[in-house]
Image (cartoon, coloured by chain):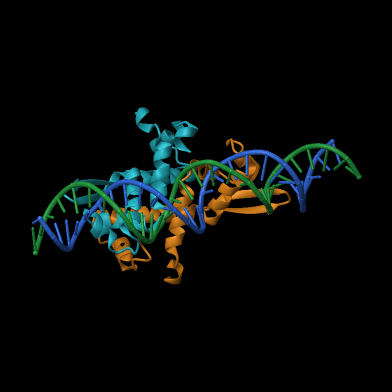
Chain colours: A cyan, B orange, C green, D blue
Amino acid sequence: MVRHMVNQQTSLDSLFHALADPTRRAVVSRLLKGAAPVKQLSEPFEMGLPAFLKHLSVLEGSGLIHTEKQGRVRTCRVDAERLAAAEGWLSQQRAIWHGRTDRLADFVESQTPEQIS
Amino acid sequence: MVRHMVNQQTSLDSLFHALADPTRRAVVSRLLKGAAPVKQLSEPFEMGLPAFLKHLSVLEGSGLIHTEKQGRVRTCRVDAERLAAAEGWLSQQRAIWHGRTDRLADFVESQTPEQIS
DNA sequence: GAATCAGTTTGCCATATGGGAAACTATTTA
DNA sequence: TAAATAGTTTCCCATATGGCAAACTGATTC
């Protein structure tokens, strides 16, 4: 369980960083409606493929999407659990704000500063 | 209302960017427990004041915190509504994922691509 | 008035980020 | 087999980011 928490920090860093760009948020939004190949995903945007691939690799690095290549087509799909992780941090904060002392808040309090921040 | 939505994009950019750093998340977390002056806020961190001030200005730029100076002390407080805005985007996405068609989802759908992404 | 304290400004640095162009690989399709 | 398609790689560029040290301003305190 604790092991499972290691690098929660870095994980949130890359999650929020991945979401801090309109192109990447649009891709996430699009993928929530269903998997799609790279080229089709890239069509709404004005940048070239190399630039677009960098966005995809940021998203994949954050765990927000997973990709798989078959033949010459790479299919991308979203990982909704990672989105939930970002939402989770925010709702933990709201819990702190509301001065809650339920199990969730207790859990947050039990973490070391390095783990929560 | 539409006016109120303009630059939602940039707003989310700076919100998520502000949250994509452990120091800044820690400051938000700390401030949710109550307002505090700059120096006190900076104490848990190992960086110098100039570097810390940059983090504060990123947070302030995103609207996540507001500050006010009295005498030589600048007091910082969190703006929980901005946190809720980030949470809002995420839960809108979850709504899309779940294929919901309630009022919230309808609202999201009614926005232009530039506005939601 | 001198010293301290809280914050600010200015320059500097290394690295990361977001974009482009061009050349390349591997798979379909004609 | 030739051509088109879908990605990929490499190299380059401008700007942003996160940190430092040092000098500075303005408010308190001794």
Q: Is B86 rendered above or below residue B52?
A: below
Residue A83 drawn at (x, y percent) = 33, 47
Residue B1 drawn at (x, y percent) = 43, 70
The one of A18 and A2 positioned closer to us in this rendering: A18
Q: Quadrant of the C terminus of chain B?
A: bottom left
Name which residue lies at 60% across and 49% down: B76
The one of B67 and D19 positioned closer to us in this rendering: D19
Left or right: where does residue B9 sit relative to residue A43?
right
Residue A55 drawn at (x, y percent) = 35, 52
Name which residue lies at 39% across and 31% down: A6
**Can residue B92 be seen from the camera position used here?**
no
Give residue B5's quadrant in the image: bottom left
Left or right: where does residue A104 sit relative to residue A77?
right
Residue A45 drawn at (x, y percent) = 32, 63
**Can residue A29 be seen from the camera position used here?**
yes
Q: How many marks?
A: 0
